[in-house]
Amino acid sequence: MTSRTAAPEDRYTAEPFVPAGATSLDALREAAAGCRGCPLHRDATRTVFGAGNAQGRVMLVGEQPGDQEDRQGRPFVGPAGKLLDRALAAAGIDPGETYVTNAVKHFKFTRAEPRKRRIHKAPTLREAAACAPWLAAELAVVEPELIVVLGATAGKALLGSSFRVTQVRGTVLEEEIHGRHERLVPTVHPSSVLRADDREAAYQGLVSDLGVAARILA
Ligand code: URA
Ligand code: SF4
């Protein structure tokens, strides 16, 4: 008889893996490497924890690592990250001054055929909720002045399932999140710019939203 029954979806959570009272990102990153809070750890290569400037005034929150991030172990190192860095610089935010992370820390994907290219699959709200204790711990350590919310998954993870990026992009929100008062500027996900029919217009929209964040920091 086997006792390998998977936890029901509503019990997915990273909580037992988060060290209580962790005060450093290194301690969190090390613990997150062993997270099994939801099934996404099974197929991904590794946990991709947040990275960048731990003293950064801005925390950028994306969706989940992609193929390149899963291979390299760092967030936003693939095509979306390159575009994001370019947009940040264009808006007057030094990418080196930011801390970058994702709502979900393991890569979720499907394959059309075995051994074929891995295709990004959006995480569910439950998976994002399961992973939220890591994001909460990162926020508590980094204490950013401003959170830039990149797209719907990050928005729902931070602000609830009624979040609609089209309604609030480029505005400044003030919310109580994980017991802390946070200031947030939502915008689209950089991957959506890469997929847009009018890429230039989509890119300019992203830069313009990031400009709102830049003015707060000025
Ligand atoms: N997209 C994301 O949301 N995060 C990454 O780290 C890479 C691509
Ligand atoms: Fe843990 Fe998040 Fe990975 Fe799920 S996605 S196993 S909660 S780190």
Image: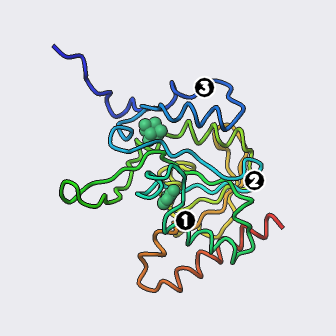
> Circle 2 is placed at which residue position?
56
Please state if 215 lies on the left or on the right of 196 as rendered. Answer: right
Q: Which residue is painted at 28% across and 27% down in the image? A: 6
Q: Position of residue 94 (x, y in %)?
A: 74, 67
- Residue 82 seen in the figure: yes
Q: How many marks?
A: 3
Q: Secondary structure at mark 3?
A: loop
Residue 137 occupies quadrant: top right
Q: Position of residue 161 (x, y in %)?
A: 47, 51
Q: Which residue is painted at 25% across and 21% down in the image? A: 4
Instruction: Identify the image's colour scheme: rainbow, by chain, secondary structure or one colour.
Output: rainbow
Q: CA distance from mark 3 to mark 1?
A: 29 Å
Q: Secondary structure at mark 2?
A: loop
Q: CA distance from mark 2 to mark 1?
A: 17 Å
Q: Secondary structure at mark 1?
A: helix
> Circle 1 is placed at which residue position?
81
Q: CA distance from mark 2 to mark 3?
A: 23 Å
Which badge, 2 or 3, is on the more N-terminal residue?
3
Residue placed most toward the observer, 133 or 119: 119
- Checking the image for residue 19, the label placed there is 3
